[in-house]
Amino acid sequence: MSALDIRQLRYFIAIVEEKTISAAAKRLHLSQPPLSQQLKAMEEALGTTLIERNGKSLAVTEAGKTLYQHALEIVQLMEEAQTAVTAVGQGMNGNLSLGVNTFSENLLPAILEDFQAAFPEVTYKIQQNESVHLCQLVRERVLELAIIRLPLPLEDFHVLHLRTEPFYFVTAQKLPIEKTEIELRDLQQSRLIFPSTEGLGVHYLLLEAFSRYPFTPNIVGECSDIELLMTLVANHFAATIVPETLIPRFTKRAVHTYRIANTSELTGSVGLIWLKNHHLSKAAQNFISFLQARL
C-alpha cells in the first residue's frame, strides 16, 4: 500500500464536503477527469472503497468517513506547521539567545520592551556574565548574541557599537568640592575597590587610565557583584569607579557620585557581538536590525 500525500488528502476533503466531483473540481480549480483519477488512485492505494457512486450522487463509506476525519486533522497540522516554520523563518517567533554583561544590564529592559512590541511571539534565553565569558559562550554557540564591554580581542566577531559612556567616582564620603566632576589625579588618597576582577575589560580600563599618572592607585579590593559593591561603598569600606550605566543603581544608597572629568582618559564602550561566518536565526537578525535602527 502506497502512502497518500497531502495534496490527495486535500482533494478528498473537497470531494466529501462538496458531495459531487464536479463541485469539488470547481473548488480545486481542476477538471473533473484528473480529480476522478486521484480518487481512484487513493482507493487503490488504501485497498478499499472510499466513495460509492450512484449516478451523479456520492455516498461516503465508513472507510471514507474515517479517512475524512484523519485528513482534516493532518491538513490542519500541516498548515499549522507551515505557519509556525514561516513565522520562525521571518523572526516573528522563535527564540532569541542573548548574553548581557554584568555592567550593561540596565540597557536591556527598555531595548527588550520595544523589541517585544515589534515581535511579541519571540521567546528569550538571557544570560548575565562577564564579557570574556560571554564571548566564549558565543564562540561555543551557546548564545547567538551578547552585549559586552570593550576593549576585548574580537577578531572572531562582528561588532555593533551601542554606546560610549563616561565613568563616575562613587563614594560615601562627600568630597570638599562644589563641582560634580573630578579628575583621576585627585584620587591618590582614595581607597578604591574595582568593580571588576583582574584581566577583565573594566579592570584593564581603570589600570590603563591610572597608568598615565606618576602614582599607584590605592586598590584595596575587587568586586564584580554589583549589589555587594554598592553595599561596601555605602558602608564606607572603600570608594569605587563605575561606568555611567550603573549610576542609577546607586541612587537609593547614601553615596555621592562625581563624573570623571577628562573623558579622553577614561570612557567605556558597549557593543553587541555575534560570531563571524555563522548563520544567525531570523530572530537574532531582526534584533540586530532593530538595534541598528534604534541607534
Image: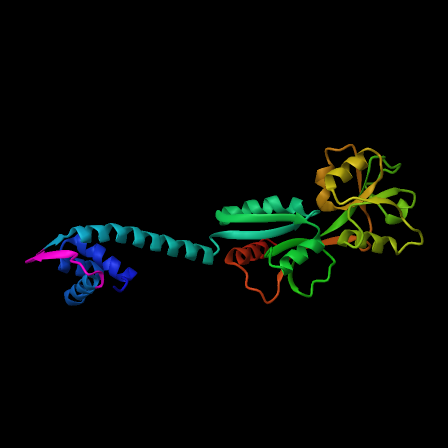
| Residue 284 place in picture, x, y as percent | 55, 56
Q: Nearer the viewer, residue 273 or 33?
A: 33
**Residue shown at 26% from the left, 64% from the top:** 2
| Relative horizontal placement of residue 146, taking residue 24 as reference (left or right) | right
Left/right of residue 278 with respect to residue 242 in the rendered view? left
The quarter in which the N terminus is drawn is bottom left
The image shows residue 277, relative to residue 177, as above or below, that is below
Q: Residue furthest right?
A: 214
The reply to whether the magenta stretch includes residue 76 is no
Q: Quadrant of the C terminus?
A: bottom right
Q: Position of residue 154 (x, y in %)?
A: 69, 62
Query: Would residue 211 be found to the left or right of residue 234 on screen?
Result: right
Question: Image point 65% across, 53% down: which residue?
Answer: 147
Magenta stretch: give its range. Answer: 45-57
Quadrant of the image occupied by residue 28: bottom left
Q: Residue furthest left?
A: 55
271, above or below 248, in the image: below
Q: How is the image coloured?
A: rainbow
Residue 147 versus residue 117: which sits nearer the camera? 147
Expressed as whole percent of the image width and height from the top left, the position of residue 241 reads 80, 45
Q: Is residue 47 in the magenta section?
A: yes
The mark tally for this picture is 0
At x 78%, y 32%, the residue is 254
Whether residue 115 is visible, yes or no, is no
Residue at 63% of width from left, 48% of height from top?
A: 127
Relative to 107, say whether 279 is above or below.
below
Q: Is residue 177 visible?
A: yes
Residue 151 position by quadrant:
bottom right
Choose top left, top right, bottom left or bottom right for residue 249: top right
